Image (cartoon, rainbow, N blue to C red):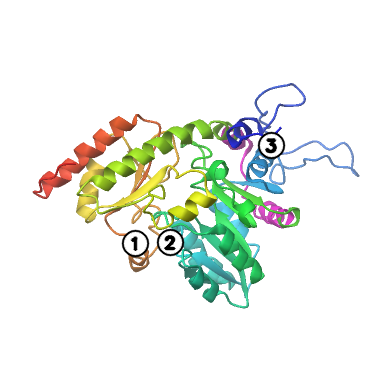
Amino acid sequence: MSERRETKLIHSAGIDPLTGAVNVPIYLSSTFHQESIDSFGPFDYSRSGNPTRKSLEETIAKLEGGARGLAFSSGMAAISSAFMLLKAGDHVLVSEDVYGGTYRFITEVLEKFKVDYTFVDMTDLGEVAAAFQPNTKVVYIETPSNPVMKITDIEMAAKLAKANDAMTFVDNTFMTPLYQNPLELGADIVLHSATKFLSGHSDITAGLAVTKDAGLGEQLAFIQNTFGSVLGAQDSYTLIQGIKTLGARTKQSGETTARIAEYLHRHPLVEEVYYPGFSFHPGNPIHSRQASHAGCVLSFRLADKDAARILVDALEIPVFAVSLGAVESILSYPATMSHAAMPPAEREKRGITDGLLRFSAGLEHPDDLINDFSQALEKIAIAKGLSVAD
């Protein structure tokens, strides 16, 4: 029987075969007894493998339709480990408006290992095609991008990569496997900051990677074991529980996001709203083709930093914090949070202005959030001596 993704989210971890428990057991053990000197069991040391983590890894592999899943201590641990598949002399193409932590790793760490890189506008396939070099080995994509929500055609970018004997990595954090499956579109590795939507409760940091084929999975598993940046058993269990409620959480958060996007778009103090659910968003046709949901994150631009500061101080419901994808709404200021590692000139070039804010809708009542935005925007108007009707 073919199951829809919402059903798979709940049942992919399965039932414990020993006891019938509907929840995966938490194996809080660093080491495992072996029966003989000549024959080891499937687990020996939890850095190399743990039954709880294995259940999570099998779950995410099923959900993404991949051959091998791997669970890491953070999203950046997963991303960094994937890049460690490269060697000195290789070259990578990277979405220009990539997450700040990824930007930092590429520009300050990969460079030390003599891996070259080029940031490109992935929405322009002509620019992508022209940027390939003989030593290009990876095309790294975020779509929607963080924070200005640009959309990359995964299928076409992956075809370009394959034609140039390169792999395609896709950060799927914003969409999750519920709404977008990059491996089905030609990607070789899909990555997640599972701290965000997959966990959904701001209680753990975690990263996930899924490879399209088993051989690549073995290579990445070797790097994971060698570096030791693995997810612990307790956090693996917590993440499995979070995945089970993903469908219900994102359904409500997505409806709220759409309403707030419309409200902000109509407000005269908001200069621009970045949201792929808008029919007039430049990437909407592509996003609608490759994803089944507009997502639960938007960004919006106010006039300047002063306006952003007034709004942040006035809002009462959203948490003002790093991160996204939780049951509580989270408002972030990319310039000093997610993209603080990016030099100001590079941020400006990518549209990450001092008036830009990112909003991740939680599970609060949408009317309460809209009323909160209304009173906060009114305070901007008062401070600037404006008269606006939202």
Tag 3 residue: 55
Q: Mark 3 near mark 2, Cβ–Cβ under 8 Å?
A: no
**Image quadrant occupied by the N terminus:** top right
Above or below 135: residue 37 = above
Question: First in sequence: mark 3 or mark 2?
Answer: 3
**Image quadrant occupied by the C terminus:** top left
Q: Nearer the viewer, mark 3 or mark 2?
A: 2
Identify the residue at horizontal 45%, vertical 45% (top origin): 294
- Amino acid type, callout 1: Gly
Tag 2 residue: 97
- Amino acid type, callout 3: Ser
Question: First in sequence: mark 3 or mark 1?
Answer: 3
Q: Position of residue 100 (x, y in %)?
A: 44, 58
Identify the residue at horizontal 72%, vertical 43% (top origin): 49
Tag 1 residue: 351
Disc 3 from disc 2: Cα separation: 34 Å
Q: Is residue 201 visible?
A: no
- Amino acid type, callout 2: Asp
**Mark 3 crowd level (few <14, some 14–19, many ≥20, 10 Å Cα):** many
Residue 32 highlighted magenta (yes or no):
no
Mark 1: secondary structure? loop
Span of residues in magenta: 217-239
Q: Nearer the viewer, mark 3 or mark 1?
A: 1
Q: Nearer the viewer, residue 327 or 54?
A: 327
**Mark 2 crowd level (few <14, some 14–19, many ≥20, 10 Å Cα):** many
Q: Is residue 290 visible?
A: yes
Disc 2 from disc 1: Cα separation: 8 Å
Q: Position of residue 162 (x, y in %)?
A: 65, 66
**Mark 1 crowd level (few <14, some 14–19, many ≥20, 10 Å Cα):** some
Q: Mark 2 near mark 1, Cβ–Cβ under 8 Å?
A: yes
* Residue 314 figure quarter: top left
